[in-house]
Image (tube, grey):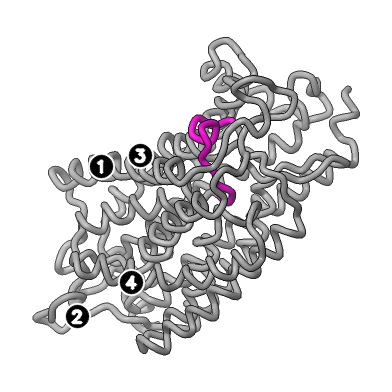
Amino acid sequence: MYTEQVSTDNIVSAFIYFVSAVSVLFVVIGLGLIDSGLARKKNVLHTWVQKFVACLLGGAGMGVCGYAIWQWQFYTAFGVDGALKQALSDWWLGSHAVTTASVMLDPKAVPEADVQQVFVVFFITFAMATIGLIHSGTIERIKSAPLYTMAFIAGLIFCPLAGYLTWGPVSPLTNLGLHDFEGVLPLYVFAGTWSLIVAWRLGPRAGVFSPDPLGLKPGASNYASVALGAFFIMVAVPLVAIGSTWIAPGKGVSGISMTQSGIGIILVNVFCALLGGGIAGAIVACLTKEPVWVFFGPVAGAVMCGTLFDIGTSLQCVLFGMGGPIVAMLTSRLISLLKIDEPKVVPLGLGPGAVGAILVGFVHWGKATAGFPDLTGEFAPGHAHITPLLQLEGVLAVMALAAVPALLICLVFEKTSGLRISRQCEVDGMDVTYWSKNAEEITAK
């Protein structure tokens, strides 16, 4: 038995990451509450059903080998022969390292085993949040079959690849100088791009851009639900941020890209972003007469600052946070001009996420990043440097990684069983159409 695996330091670290991993589910709950609050009453039940199932399928896909794909970067950095094959062998869901109690694992082969096993769960919940965002961009009009197909394929292949490319100290793009912290690129930019493509192919909901012959139009049914959903996400953001760190007991805390930081600094920066975004969101709401920006403001501020939390100052995070709702509102106006009906994920995720990531390249141009302790040469700590160009390349790479499969899946379903619900389903409501056995009870509620 290897009792050093269950030292106090290891157990405390594992617990911290466990809290962070589970807290990602607050994002999923928050998204569901926001969606149900902004959906027509006739679609609320099915909106929850679709989100619940899609998130489970996305998490299941990631669980198969998602963490193994992320580990690929470390196996490469440490010079392991057949790095990808070995990482898959060691860290797929049924592997010895995943299914064996930490005290039975040699720390030379599997260091901090409990922490690594918790990170398997972190990646599963991360994929669930990504799929939850994608679903939020398609509510009230996508059929379940294409949504569930997208969820599993994205969780199995494309979410892990986005994380492998951009999130981690020795990932391919980080190793060139790309900086991320809270997974802005593999979460918000990825999900925002995927949602943009699917929303474009689905077309707008009835009554969004022109009057519907039957008077159908989307509209908020419960702003209290929207407010509660935003609050859940606000609770999740600081907890998720802690999961994006490297905690070395007795040595220090670094961001996921091995940039020197601290838990206190990160938490201060998170709350500065939430406060800045909240204040600016309230101003935007007053100017536009759209109350939803009151609740979206803190979320947009946090997304805008997601690449900055570990290396920024409190003032920078306030300013970035205040810019979040403005960028989100402008993004919303732009896609509306293009007749694309997606009022949440693209404005809140893709717009602020991409702009914030690129701005970090200017604000912290030349700051050392990437690498891993005790490695030398091309993987030595701090060997790479942040630049605006690398930040832009990272954004474009993730957008391409999301856009291509999203478009292909949409085209396949458009040519076969269909992507969008029928006109009659839209008129009657998805709850009655899909759950007709309880139609009278649903209608009454």
User: Most prominent secondary structure in the magenta stretch?
Assistant: loop
What is the magenta range?
170-182
Magenta stretch: residue 172 in it? Answer: yes
- Mark 2, residue position: 216
> Under tag 1, what secondary structure?
helix
Q: In the rendered structure, which amino acid carries the disc numbered 4?
A: Asn
Left/right placement of residue 101 relative to residue 24 reads right
Left/right placement of residue 41 relative to residue 201 reads right
Q: Could you tell which of marks 1 and 2 lies nearer the N-terminus?
A: 2
Where does the image place residue 76, in percent across and percent down from the top left?
Answer: 57, 20
Q: Could you tell which of marks 2 and 3 lies nearer the N-terminus?
A: 2
Q: Could you tell which of marks 3 and 1 lies nearer the N-terminus?
A: 3
Q: Could you tell which of marks 4 and 3 lies nearer the N-terminus?
A: 4
- Mark 4, residue position: 43
> Under tag 3, what secondary structure?
helix
Q: Is residue 325 above or below residue 267?
A: below
Q: Residue at x 53, y 12 (%)?
A: 82
Q: Depth-wise, is mark 3 or mark 1 nearer the camera?
A: 3
Q: Depth-wise, is mark 4 or mark 2 nearer the camera?
A: 2
Magenta stretch: residue 415 in it? Answer: no
The local crowd at label 1, few if under 14, some if 14 to 19, many if 20 or more residues have their Cα within 10 Å, is some
Q: Residue furthest left?
A: 213
The local crowd at label 4, few if under 14, some if 14 to 19, many if 20 or more residues have their Cα within 10 Å, is many
Q: Residue at x 54, y 31 (%)?
A: 175
Q: Residue at x 73, y 29 (%)?
A: 373
> Under tag 2, what secondary structure?
loop
The local crowd at label 3, few if under 14, some if 14 to 19, many if 20 or more residues have their Cα within 10 Å, is some
Q: In the rendered structure, which amino acid carries the disc numbered 2?
A: Leu
- Mark 3, residue position: 401
Where does the image place residue 101, in percent across and percent down from the top left?
Answer: 77, 30
Q: In the rendered structure, which amino acid carries the disc numbered 3?
A: Leu
